[in-house]
Image: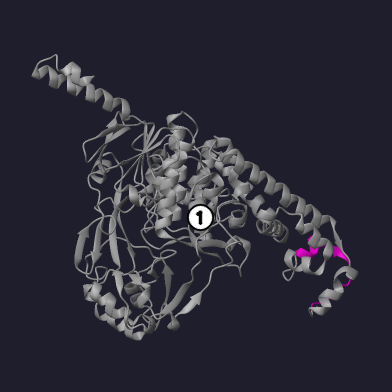
Amino acid sequence: MIKCMMCCVGTLAKQILFYYLCNSVFKRGMKFTFDIIVIGAGHAGCEAAHAAARLGSRVLLITMDMNKVAQMSCNPAVGGIAKGQIVREIDAMGGMMGIVTDRTSIQMRMLNRSKGPAMHSPRSQADRMQFIARWREALDNTPGLSLWQDTVKQLVIKDGRVTGVITSLGVTFNARAVILTAGTFLGGMMHVGRVMTPGGRVSEPASTGLTGQLVSLGLTAGRMKTGTPPRIDGRTVDFSLATEQHGDEPSHHRFSYLTDTRSRLAQRSCWTIYTNREVHDVLRDALPDSPLYNGQIRSIGPRYCPSIETKIVTFAERDSHQLFLEPEGETTAEYYLNGFSSSLPWQVQVEALRKIPALRDVQLYRPGYAIEYDYFDPTGLYHSLESKFVGGLFLAGQINGTTGYEEAAGQGLVAGINAHHSVNGMEPLVLGRDEAYIGVLIDDLVTKGVDEPYRMFTSRAEYRILLRQDDADMRLTPQSYRLGLADAHRYDLQQSKQREVESLIDFASAYTVRTSHINDALIARRMEPLKQGCRLVDLLTRPEFDFALLAELNAVIAERLDKVEAERRDEIIEAAEIRIKYDGYIRRERELADRLTRLECIKLRGKVNYGEVHQLSTEARQKLTAIDPATLGQASRIPGVSPSDISVLLLLLRS
């Protein structure tokens, strides 16, 4: 049809008509206006885009490489101390990290089982390439979510609000909210010895331009540093000189509370080895070429994940450090050498590693390297993760000064929810410190700021007995279901689990274990017999007893446990047992949290001109003005604001 029409007009007219028709078709097929744009497809960006689209927003996810979404830039593992709790919270809310990890797991372990339940933390090794593939599959099948491969070079700002982005290809996309999750790519600079290469990840370019624009808009930028170790060819490792570390039974643990997420991949072991004096001598002699010690790197690195050169300097008295060989996938020969993060010259890394007996013939896939990148002071954010300086701009992940996939993903989930709420005129979601580790994380960031890459620990949560990994669904799924993110299936599973747990606790409270039912079995096991019958719930409070043992000793208890839903039996029994054993601690911490939460109900933002309150200390006036806390509770957690300053504010508000 177009060809016939063009035969009837002159050359100039043909060109005009052809341009008009093609441009019309192009504009009909290609969308340039969205509700929300997410910049960066790391762990924060993927969770943000998925959550916002699931809630009903039209979302565009822009990434440099669509084949590396949710790339595990460092170790091929998810979870760990406190981080595992965050992943379970993400899953309870309807996020994807737990599901993707379960389906790509090649080893699962529950850490800290020898400690109390508040410390139990799941951790999984994952197949790196399968992890990316599963996330890409999830993104491609999320209605309302589009992807665009490109780099954003500039935000479009109008009247103090972000209205879109301009990419390196010169394409302008419009949106009512933008979520920036740039990871280590803003101003990224990689270091291997004295060799410096711009980039956000090995063989991937850095992103430039946005930092300067955001600083001009009022945000405060800084530099941080992280690093990664060499990747080892497992075919050159003498595993007979390493110690094997098996995972738990695959059926025992998983991240997701859904019932169909277990991995079908072959399970693989990790291995432990140790450095020695010879290794340390090689590293120490090369310190003049270390970017960390020759002045080449000036930014702050993660204290809790130090490089190997930092270890030998800080702990000079130690003759060895433990290292972990972690498989990168189900079938690959590639191993990640956890504990040997380094920015020393590659030749030094090879020489030092070959001093370890198990690695005497080691071949590297690539050396370790350090990377410096831009981040922004998170005290410039509200709890919703929206910028105080640019309306509609949300920041999540390492760009806020954090480190770790899990911390990034948790922020991304909250940013995605709140960006959707923002464009729809809804109240933001703010998770309390007694509701979730994600709430602790975000409150720490926006209230205290960071002076080093932030990593979550159980010790950061004052209510950690309330924030256990076993009950994240009980805490968060009902709230997420009301928001519309957790679907009906997930909510029904949570309600069913809650009924089963309560029923099991009721049984334990009502059933009396008689001496005639159990003493013979106790004596046979050389355990102290009961002097009189007692309720099962009282027996379970003793550290030497649990449901599994008592089911072996008592047929009635065994019969009752057999009635628990088979697919989630271990999970339900564990949750009921923890509730019984730690009931007193849980109730006491709940009462404490409720008392302190009263300060969170006292609104502060917009009510006080701190500069005029001379009863406050000078430091308190400066900190309160800079952070502008939303509530008196948040004000009480600001470093430099004393209890006496809080008393002054309380009296002022009352008057």
**Quadrant holding the N terminus:** top left
Magenta segment boundaries in residue numbering: 527-540
Total residue callouts:
1
Q: Disc 1 on helix, strand or loop? A: helix
- Give the camera-side residue of 323 and 296: 323
Q: Is residue 144 visible?
A: yes
Task: Tell me residue 303's x, y (percent).
Answer: 39, 65
Say whether residue 470 is magenta.
no
- Residue at numbered disc 1: 103
- Indicate left or right for 547 with 7 as reference: right
Asked whether the viewer can see residue 79, the reply is no
Residue in the foreground of this view, choosing between 622 and 161: 161
Residue at coordinates 31% horizontally, 54% vertically from top-left? 184
Q: Position of residue 311 (x, y in %)?
A: 36, 74
Q: Height in image: 141 above or below 321?
A: above
Badge 1: residue crowd in 10 Å (few <14, some 14–19, many ≥20): many
Residue 463 is situated, as x and y percent measured from the top left of the image, at 59, 55
Looking at this rendering, what residue extends furthest in the left direction?
A: 11
Give the quarter of the figure containing the C terminus: top right
User: Which residue is at 85% across, 70% downward?
Assistant: 518
Q: Tag 1: residue type?
A: Arg
Q: Return the x and y of residue 239 as percentages of the image width and height.
A: 43, 79
